[in-house]
């Protein structure tokens, strides 16, 4: 305590583990939401905070947490993410020393691990920025589009085909909400468990266009209860994407490993880190 009083508080791995544990505890407590977990929407918050990165200009990315402000919070792609930001507010109040940008990305890493996904080594060091750092609308993908759009958006961030397919495998988690994106339903039967089911269903199921008044989406022939977006279907229409879909459908270990690597990369895009060290957090069931 005396040593601490001499200078600014410099958090260590144990301090970030406390933040991780608090998020994990809140995930376990707050089950009265969607399919029983805020985990999927936390993953989406971390992704949308990071996926604005533009490698040409070095703008966007998770550094800054500019989605706290309009206009970025009002961008169509970010509809519904207030639920995730609000979920993390009590954690920010408990650990005021952590930046929102670190907290939102740590929230995504924690959710992946707590929902039985791969380990996501995480690095601190993001600093919050003001409204002037908000990114322009249109940097995140539009689900109504095709493989060309998916490639355009993700190559702007610096990803190759294999990495794009692995990242979109996060659609194992969560669901679409008509009052957010206009689309409706989950991608698989266990939307609160991280699996390679998205890929397995994409190749093994027959997908028909859903008959409804909403935007074009696809429904599984067997049950009519699952969904795929046009951009998800693009992953089996395009042969360079499809070879990775087929590989991940067969090999869950390969998907977990490659997803972890690429999600770590996503959360770090454009961040001027001062340290190389990544932390591996213990999950709530391993302690
Ligand atoms: Fe996604 N996503 N996503 N997605 N996403 C939606 C939900 C979730 C696209 C569109 C949508 C990624 C890539 C793409 C998650 C993670 C990731 C919804 C539904 C739409 C629409 C939103 C709603 O109505 O609530 C498109 C298009 C792409 C694309 O790449 C072409 C990636 C890369 C990730 C990631 O995490 C790495 C998650 C999780 C959800 C579920 C959210 C929830 O509330 O549940």
Image: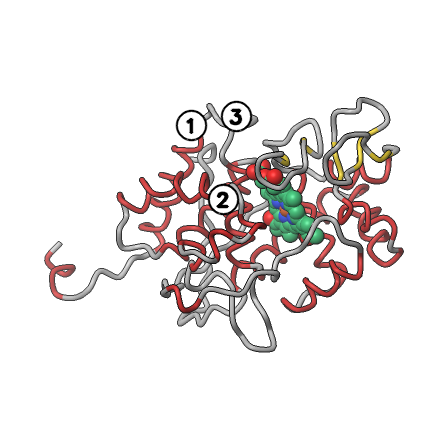
Marks 2 and 1, the one that precedes in the sequence = 1
Identified at 51% across, 48% down, the residue is 45
Marks 2 and 3, the one that precedes in the sequence = 3
Q: Quadrant of the C terminus?
A: top left
Q: Residue 36: which numbered mark, if any?
A: 3
In the figure, is residue 32 to the left or right of 176?
Answer: left
Distance of mark 2 from mark 1, alpha carbons?
16 Å
Q: Quadrant of the N terminus?
A: bottom left
Reading the image, the residue beneath label 2 is 81
Most extreme residue toward the front is: 213
In contact (CB < 8 Å): disc 2 and disc 3? no
| Residue 198, position as x, y percentages in the image | 74, 39
Q: Nearer the viewer, residue 225 or 236?
A: 225
Identified at 68% across, 37% down, the residue is 183
Distance of mark 1 from mark 3, alpha carbons?
8 Å
Residue 23 visible in the snapshot: yes
Marks 1 and 3, the one that precedes in the sequence = 1
- Within 8 Å of ligand 1, the CB of disc 3? no
* Secondary element at image label 2: loop
Q: Is residue 227 above or below residue 131?
A: above
Q: Nearer the viewer, residue 1 or 99?
A: 99
In the figure, is residue 102 to the left or right of 162?
Answer: left
Most extreme residue toward the bottom is: 56
Q: Is residue 100 above or below residue 212?
A: below
Q: Residue 30: which numbered mark, if any?
A: 1
């Amino acid at each position: 305590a005396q040593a601490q009083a001499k200078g600014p508080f410099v958090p260590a791995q144990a301090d970030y583990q406390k933040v991780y544990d608090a998020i994990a505890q809140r995930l376990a407590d707050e089950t009265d939401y969607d399919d029983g977990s805020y985990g999927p929407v936390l993953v989406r918050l971390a992704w949308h905070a990071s996926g604005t990165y533009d490698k040409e200009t070095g703008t966007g990315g998770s550094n800054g947490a500019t989605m706290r402000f309009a206009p970025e919070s009002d961008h169509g792609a970010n509809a519904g993410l207030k639920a995730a930001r609000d979920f993390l507010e009590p954690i920010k109040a408990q650990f005021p020393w952590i930046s929102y940008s670190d907290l939102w990305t740590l929230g995504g890493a924690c959710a992946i691990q707590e929902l039985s996904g791969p380990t996501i080594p995480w690095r601190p060091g993001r600093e919050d920025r003001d409204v002037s750092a908000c990114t322009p609308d249109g940097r995140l993908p539009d689900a109504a589009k095709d493989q060309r759009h998916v490639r355009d958006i993700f190559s702007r961030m610096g990803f190759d085909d294999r990495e794009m397919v692995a990242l979109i495998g996060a659609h194992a988690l969560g669901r679409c909400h008509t009052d957010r994106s206009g689309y409706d339903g989950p991608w698989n039967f266990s939307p609160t468990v991280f699996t390679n089911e998205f890929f397995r269903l994409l190749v093994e199921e027959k997908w028909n266009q859903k008959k409804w008044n909403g935007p074009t989406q696809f429904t599984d022939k067997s049950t009519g209860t699952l969904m795929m977006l046009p951009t998800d279907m693009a992953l089996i229409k395009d042969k360079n994407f499809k070879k990775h879909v087929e590989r991940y459908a067969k090999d869950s270990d390969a998907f977990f490993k490659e997803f972890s690597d690429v999600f770590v990369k996503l959360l770090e895009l454009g961040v001027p880190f001062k340290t190389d060290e990544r932390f591996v957090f213990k999950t709530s069931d391993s302690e």
